[in-house]
Structure formats: C-alpha cells, structure tokens
Image: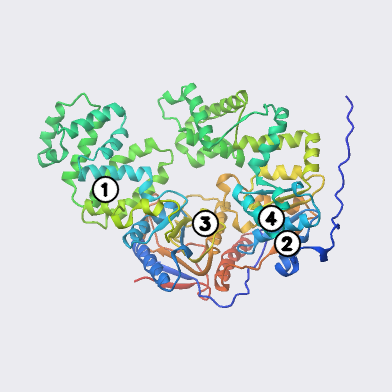
Amino acid sequence: MRMYTKVLFTKKEGGALPQLVAAETENMQSRYVVQKILEFREMGIPLEEIAVLFRSSFHSFDLELELAKANIPFRKYGGFKFIETAHVKDVVAYLRVLENSRDVVSWNRILLLLDGVGPRTAEKVVNDILENRVSLSKEFQEPITTTTKFWMGYNKYPSTIRQLFEMLCTTMVQFRTPAEKVFNIIQYYEPLLKDKYDDFMKRRKDLEIFQNIAERYETIGELLTDITLEPPTNSIVDIESPGHEREFLTLSTVHSAKGLEWRVVFIIYALDGRFPALRAAIREEEMEEERRLMYVACTRAKEHLIITYPMNVYDRDTGVILTKPSRFLEGIDSSLLEPWVVT
Amino acid sequence: MKKYVLQSQKTTPLRLVKPEHFRIDYRRELNEAQYEAVTSTEGPHLIIAGAGTGKTRTIVYRVAYLVECGVKPDTILLLTFTRKAAQEMLRKASLLLDRRCEHVSGGTFHSFANSILRRYAKLVGYETNYTILDQTDAEDVVNLLRTKLKYDAKEKRFPRKETLYDLYSRSVNTLVPLPQLLLNEYPQFLELEEDIQKLYQVYVHYKRQHNLMDYDDLLFNCATLLREHDDVRRVLEERFRYVMVDEYQDTNRIQAEIIKLLSQAHRNIMVVGDDAQCIYSFRGSTIHNILTFPNEYPDCKIIKLEENFRSTQPILNLANAILNRNDILKHSSE
C-alpha cells in the first residue's frame, strides 16, 4: 500500500533552518529549552506563540519543573501534569510524611494503598499519629529494636501497616541522599503500583523520571518544594484557572497538537527509543505511524522549529543507554536540519 | 406483501445558478487546487490536504458553493471528528455566505448514527428510547457485571473496569481479537482470557436487554441498519445527497462502511484528509480507509492541496524529507 506523494511548498520567502540540538542530559535539555524560550520572548514572540511538543506525556516532567523555577506559566495538553498523576502523588506522599509526620492527607493516601486498610483503619492510625501514640520522628532517633518493641503493642493493625512503618524507618535512618531515599521508596512501592494499576509498565517510567529528578537534590525539603510548585508567585491554581487572561506557554503531546500551529515549536526527547518509543518487535505499521507523528509535530511550526534530544538516557526496560537522535531525523542532510550541541 | 421499489432519483448536475451570479468570488479567494476541490460537486472525490494547506477553508467554501448552486442545505451532510469542528465550519460558512449554511447537517459520526437510530432502532432490535452510555457509564456497567459474575472475588486479580472496557472497545474498532490484544497490551491477564471473553458476552447481552448503547454500538448498529435494510438506506440516500467527511485518515472501518452505504446511489461523496497525518490507530482508526478509497471508487477524482500557508520553506523541506525517506526505505525493502 503506497502513500500519496505530495510535496508541500509555500510562496513565503526565507526563514530559519530547523535545528537538531543535542544536550548531554535530560536536565540540560530542559534548561536549554527554557533559555531559548526566554530568548524568543525577548525577540517579541509571546508565550502563546510558542509550544513544546513531545511523544509521551512523561517526557515533559523535568521541563515542567524548570519552567516553574523560571516562572514561565504553561498549560499542558494531553496526559496529566507530572505531579497530578496518581502514582507520582503516591511517591510524593511517602516523602511528605518523612518530612512532616503530621501530614494527615499524605498519611491517608499511603495507608489506603495498603491491603486490608479501609477508611476506618486509616483514621485510627492517623489519630494515633496525631495524638503522639505513634511518632515517627521520635522513633527514628532510637534504635530499630525500640521500634520493634513499640509495634508489639500494635498488633491489632494489619501487618501491611507495620511493613509501611518499617520501610519509612529504614528510609529515614539508613539512606542519606534524596536519591537513595526515593529509590528505597520506589522499591517498596512497585508491588503496590503493580497491584493498583493495570498499566503499571507505563507508570513505572514516570517513577524512573522522578528518580532522576531526585538525584539533583541535596535535601528532601528542596525536592518537595520544587515538585509541588507552590510558591506564592507561581501557583498551579493561577496557571490553571479558566478565563485567566494570562500569557502562557503550551506543552502538548503531539497527538493533542494536531491541527494547531505556533510561531515557535520545540520537539523535545527526539531520542531514538523515546520517539519512536523503543519496544521489542514493534511492527512496521506502528513504526510508520511514529514517523507520521514526527511529521505532524514538525508541520505545527510556522517560523522556528527546534528539535532536541538528550544524549545519555538509561532505559530500564531494556538495560540499554539511549544516545541517538530519532531514526526519522538521522541522516537528514545538515542543509535541511542544522546540528547543534548544548555545552 | 409485494414490494414496489421506487428508483432512486438521479441527481441532476447543478447548473441552476450562473457563475457570474455567485456572491463569492471563488476564483479570487482560492488557489487552483482549492478551487478545483470546492467546485467539484458530483461524484466521488478524495482531497489530500497536506498540513497547513487550508483544509478547513476548502470545506467551508465548498459548503457555501453547494448552497449557492441551489442545493438544499439540509441535504448536505458534513461529518467531522468533533462536534466543535462541524459547528465551527458551518459558522464560518454562514458568515461567508448567509444563514442558509446553518441548516447543513453537520456533526460527528456518533451524533449522526444516533439521529438515525432514534428513528429506526426497532429494526436492529432496540427501542428508540435507548440510553446512550458514555465511557464512564459503560465502565460502570462492566464493573457491575464483573461483580455479579464474582470475578472480583477471584484469587487472581481481575482487570479493572477501565481496562476491560478499553479492551472490548478496541477489539470492536480494530477487529483485533481479544486474545491478541491481551497479549500485546496486558500479558499479565492472558490466563484470564476465558473469563474476560465471557464477561464481554454478558456485557453485550446486558446492553440489549436493558436498551443501552455505548458509543461503539451506535456506529455498529447504524452500519447494520444501512446494510440490512435497503428501504431505510434509500430514504437516507434521498435525504443526504452530498456527503462530506473531514479527517478521513482518522476514520475507522465501521465509519467507512457507513458512508459507503450512505452514498451508494448518488455517489456524491467527498472525503478530505491527509494520509501523512494518520496518528490514531490506537483508537481504531485505520490509514487503510484513505489509501484504498480509489479502489473503492475507481472513478474518483483525487485533488491534492500542497500549497502550505503556515510554515516557512525550510520547515517544509524538513517535513518533506521526513516523509520522503519513508518512500526510499519502502522501495529498497520491496
């Protein structure tokens, strides 16, 4: 089955060459995009005329944090915002109770994830915590044995609750950096994730991203602050409130960007293994659809098209390090696509 | 009872209004390819509209053109991907010409199917006052039955209602059998295949029993109606003399069948789309429809819109290269 050949042309003269920009890491990619967006704004292009497109929703998570830091308001289409996804919220809830053992909302969230724990049991535990019958922070100062002894009086709770407390204790006492702590939490959380979501494979990817983000932080507190993006100058509510006539940048999956156009378009994560997604035995028709997706993404741009990819991404599913640009772009002449490197 | 079948009226080519009396100067406002598409009224047409080539504009002008030619607005059927798209196009056509364009029948495949089934549902085994289940409703029904069959109490965890509904819907739309879908998407549930199939049968039965249709049923029953009831089909063919379909590359196989049946007699069918932008196969759309349109309608006229009004040439060059490398690769592997 052949496609219909067609050659798009325009009567408009001139225009900048599209760029293919390699960044060493995911975070450098994000920082590059942020900096370029600010440059385009300086040039007089409003945020409304700029979009960042990606193959899968999770590809923009790191960028979302950098945008928040730079106070660039954005709206995201297609998929959820990173922090709003249930599984990321779960992991964040564990971190929150480590930071603040009286965070009832987070306690409720992680308790209700457990087998045999319903709203009533959760409430009982939360009350015990609030009335200092269980004080995590105090327990952590003391040897584990004390903790064990402590639990002997609480046998009426399901064993899953005990395991949760034990996990939180070890995370607090035995692991020092945020990255290590997050790693330990995810280890514990994965079976729950698997049990709770049928599409846990996809969601696990988000947690991987979360792990990568945690690696850049010195303390849990800073990580949580950045991730919740709650400072008064830039609250999520502000960005999201409907009818608010504020200038904003568009983040979108390629699917949701169909039919739309912007003066400036970034395509991030144009990394082979992410766009197209790397999957064993992917069928040829699927690969062709991925190619069309890249075509749709490129044809959204009116004046500037900047395609970026990080050069060093570990893919946990395959154990492969992804380094190459998307196969749909590789080998395209530099007279059509100008190669750049971020340093 | 003997049947006497009236012959379908041939559409007479439209020459009621002389071009010099048109209110809109089509020649001036459209480029060559757009003009050709807009002024082609009779017979099957495939409009390949590349990205940014003024597809919406072309459809809007064609609606206006047909109306200016004296076609009764409500005999024009415009099917689009979203309701908003249809409303937007008809609003623009009204601004362009006049309020007659508001009476064009426009909407999604689902709303169209619904409007027909509200009249003829009895012929496919439903009451006309059936309830439409949206996705959440449908999931809730699946959940109810899942509990009734005690699948939720099994030792091995049974898929959630969202997963089940997704599986059923995708199987209907893509024609991929359930076991294959399970293997591709949720291999952890393969061993539950039998129960999952059983639940599906129960779900189908339950909907009929309670006069419920989910989104897929609307399309499916509409196609069945047109396929099995010639008399109804003929009435509808008379009613809708000019059929237009937007985003044809994103239609699924049932939708293609519906429009084929619907335009069987007059064959005034214009589909608009871009094979290079078909990106929804996971929802059951199939690039097959647009690629095989000329096989279904060997006498169809293909018009390509290639002048882009959006991007600079360097951006288009890259986009072209991304697609053309596709051609090169295909040749070498053939």
Q: Secondary structure at mark 1?
A: helix
Q: State which tag comes first along the sequence, 2 or 4.
A: 4
Which three-letter amino acid code belongs to the residue tagged 3? Ala
- Which residue does the numbered mark 4 point to in the structure image? B94
Q: Are marks 2 and 4 in contact (CB under 8 Å)?
A: no
Q: Which residue is mark 2?
A: B303
Q: Which residue is mark 1?
A: A182
Look at the numbered discs 3 and 2 and tell me whether their residues touch, using CB distance below 8 Å: no
Kindly state the secondary structure of the residue where label 3 is placed. Answer: helix
| B57 vs A190, nearest the viewer | B57
In whole angstroms, how far apart are the C-alphas of marks 3 and 2? 26 Å
Q: Are marks 3 and 1 on the same chain?
A: yes
Chain holding disc 4: B
Disc nearest the viewer among 3 and 1: 3
Q: Nearer the viewer, mark 2 or mark 4?
A: 4
- Give the colour scheme shown: rainbow
In terms of secondary structure, where does tag 2 sit? strand
How many neighbours does mark 4 have within 10 angstroms: few (below 14), some (14-19), or many (20 or more)?
Answer: some
Q: CA distance from mark 2 to mark 4?
A: 25 Å
Q: Which of label 3 and label 4 is nearer to you? A: 4
Rendered position, A45 above or below A86: below
Report the residue at 52% width, 50% height from top.
Answer: A282
Residue A315 in sight here: no
- Separation of residues labelled 1 and 4 (CA atoms): 58 Å
Q: What label does residue B253 carry, if any?
A: none
Q: Where the N terminus of chain A falls, by quadrant?
A: bottom right
Residue A11 visible in image: yes
Chain under label 2?
B
Q: Position of residue B173 (x, y in %)?
A: 61, 40
